[in-house]
Image: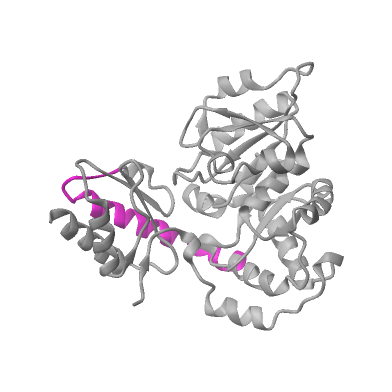
Amino acid sequence: MKYIDLRSDTVTWPTLEMRQAMARAEVGDDGYGDDPTVNRLEKMAAEKLGKEAALFVPSGTMGNQLAIFTHIQRGEEVITAEDNHIVMHEAGAAAVIAGAQLRCLKADKGRVDLCELERTIRKTHEVPKTGLICLENAHSSGVVHDLDYMRRVKEIADRHQVPIHLDGARIFNAAACLRVDAAEIAAYADSVMFCLSKGLCAPVGSILAGTADFIRRARPKRKIMGGSMRQAGVLAAAGIIALEKMTLRLHEDHERAVQLASLLSRIPGVETALEDVHINMVFIRFRCPVDTDALMQRLKSNGILANPPEDGVMRLVTHYYIDSDMVKKVADVFRNALEQ
């Protein structure tokens, strides 16, 4: 059975064009810096974000952790929202790899109180030093932070001479939502990570971008983390297509998400925060108890894959392989399942 897979946009597989490009990719040894396809991808990615240089890494988590590892000295603090990905979903790697102490602030979908942020930054004579501020946009809640918020955080960071790293795993989704170039978002961070997979459909890989000096310092640390690859141009070829073409169609995934949220909101007992559907994620809450096992079995038997609810909230994610007819079927199956 061919499933309608709404578990995440990480389930996307490479397009036919990507597979063909991977098969004919010109390659070299990236450990020596002579893989021409990787070099082209890194140059293109840096230009897209308005940064001096970029580095190809195997995953988004590695990109974020490499940024922390490069920015700070062991024992320094990293200020971040309590619900950001580096806190919730990266296996405590900041402590293990960089020796960082995370200073987590209360947040509303990744957005922190700016006065609290400034109060939290350590003064110059205090130990441990505040070594980094980490932001996330688009946030893993599906919410996109506006440019004014990004600008105000940057002003605070600059006043205290603290760099900013942006977890921009879905920065191109955020850019599509805000109708700006990704570089306009990236301008408010000293380093940026984004994923070539997820909504961009490349099978493997992420990018870490920043100044030329930052990337020069990050490169040997990537090797320490096991991220230095050889003939990686086979993977980078798909990433090039992701940047050239897939970034231009992400608004379609957002439209499917709005369609899905709207249809689900009409089902009795289902709440959907339509105002928070900024990108390709839909979060629904059930007003009354639901037999989770029965619901998940009903979805799967109808060819729909989804992650089960957590604390009464369920996330559904649209992507390149979800079309309008699939969205309608999902809504119909949910309605029938919940009515029973």
Give the answer, above or below, for where 26 lies relative to 182: below
Check residue 85 for magenta coloring. no
Quarter of the picture holding the C terminus = bottom left
Q: For this view, does 292 lie left or right of residue 81? A: left
Report x, y in % for residue 159. 72, 24
Total residue callouts: 0
Give the answer, above or below, for where 83 lies relative to 224: above
Q: For this view, does 275 lie left or right of residue 136? A: left
Give the answer, above or below, for where 4 lies relative to 101: below
Which residue: 81% across, 75% down? 28
Confirm whether residue 138 shows in the render: yes
Q: In terms of depth relative to the viewer, which is nearer, 79 or 227? A: 227
Which residue: 71% across, 41% down? 68
Which residue: 74% across, 59% down? 227
Q: In terms of depth relative to the viewer, which is nearer, 149 or 129? A: 129
Report x, y in % for residue 81. 55, 33
Report x, y in % for residue 121. 67, 22
Q: For this view, does 168 lie left or right of residue 2? A: right
**Which secondary structure class fits the magenta region best?**
helix
Confirm whether residue 189 shows in the render: no
Which residue: 30% across, 63% down? 327
Tell me where the magenta segment starts and ends, as one range: 243-272
Q: For this view, does 326 lie left or right of residue 176? A: left
